[in-house]
Image (tube, helix red, strand yellow):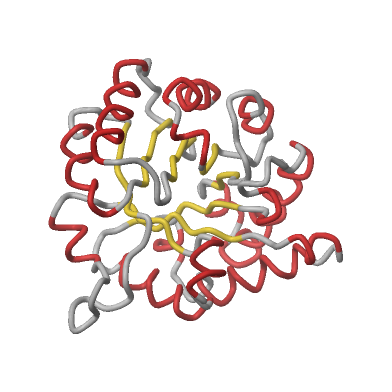
Amino acid sequence: MRKSIAAANWKMNLTWQQGEQLIDQLIAGMEPLADHKKVILAVPFPYLHMAHEKVKSQPSVFIAAQNCYSKMSGAYTGEVSVEMLQSIGIHFVVLGHSERREYFNESNQFLADKVNICLANNIHPIFCCGEPLSIREANEQDAYVRKQLEESLFHLSADDIQKIIIAYEPIWAIGTGKTASSEQAQEMHASIRKLFAEKYGDVVASEISILYGGSVKGNNALELFLQSDVDGGLVGGASLNAAEFLTIIKAL
């Protein structure tokens, strides 16, 4: 059974103290989760160790970095390596978020390099893909996402591809208050799973978790997660509020 995942992306938000309080509230409010369900918190770099220490006794809760660099070490001031993440017990990292692609010009090939170094060092990528509004309006979203996946992931073996979590982000629905309808989300998730099936076969494709990442909130999470190919969410703003995110976790 593939994993159902509620992943929080705090982005560049919260102080250390606010982050501590939020994690404490989440742990206090969470009910035990079934084995196939997990919660992943992608927190800013300065909070990774603190967050990991707080959740390490929670069997269903994990911490992710929001980025990493494509080299193991060296003169790359300000960057963070997978070796550094691994040394503090971090085994998940968000890669290819639309904000990294847009603001920091991260290309599909650069992301492929990051994916490779993560997998070689026991770090599981949460790999983001998705289209901007202009592509959606031109009805070219399937081809756009196919190119992202082919250029960044399709060089991988079947064993390695199953170590990756996919997050589909309709860029036009991130931070805008707009959300793809549950039907639109299911349509794109099914299309993505079909791409993996064409490349790796139905059995492998059926095991890959595909999360929806576009303005997931407490009041729409259940409808989204009930779709057959939507395996949870990558949640931005709503993950900064404990009550809201707890509602999303329950929707799994």
Residue at x 59% of width, y 73% of height: 150
Residue 93 vertical placement versus 8 (above, below): below
Q: Position of residue 33 (x, y in %)?
A: 39, 22
- Which residue appears at 56% of the width and 38% of the height? 231
Q: Is residue 190 left or right of residue 251?
A: right
The image quadrant that residue 80 belongs to is bottom left
Q: Residue furthest right?
A: 138
Q: Residue 14: which quarter of the image?
A: top left
- Residue 161, position in %: x, y? 45, 61
Give the side of residue 66 with respect to residue 170, left or right: left
Provide residue 228's location: percent of width, then percent of height. 67, 36
Describe residue 52's horizontal placement relative to residue 22 as left or right: left
Q: Nearer the viewer, residue 226 or 222?
A: 222
- Figure check: 169 above or below 82: above
Position of 66 relative to 210 (above/below): below
Compare residues 60 and 88 and report the one nearer the observer: 88
Name the residue: 56% across, 77% down. 151
| Above-or-below relation of 1 to 78 | above
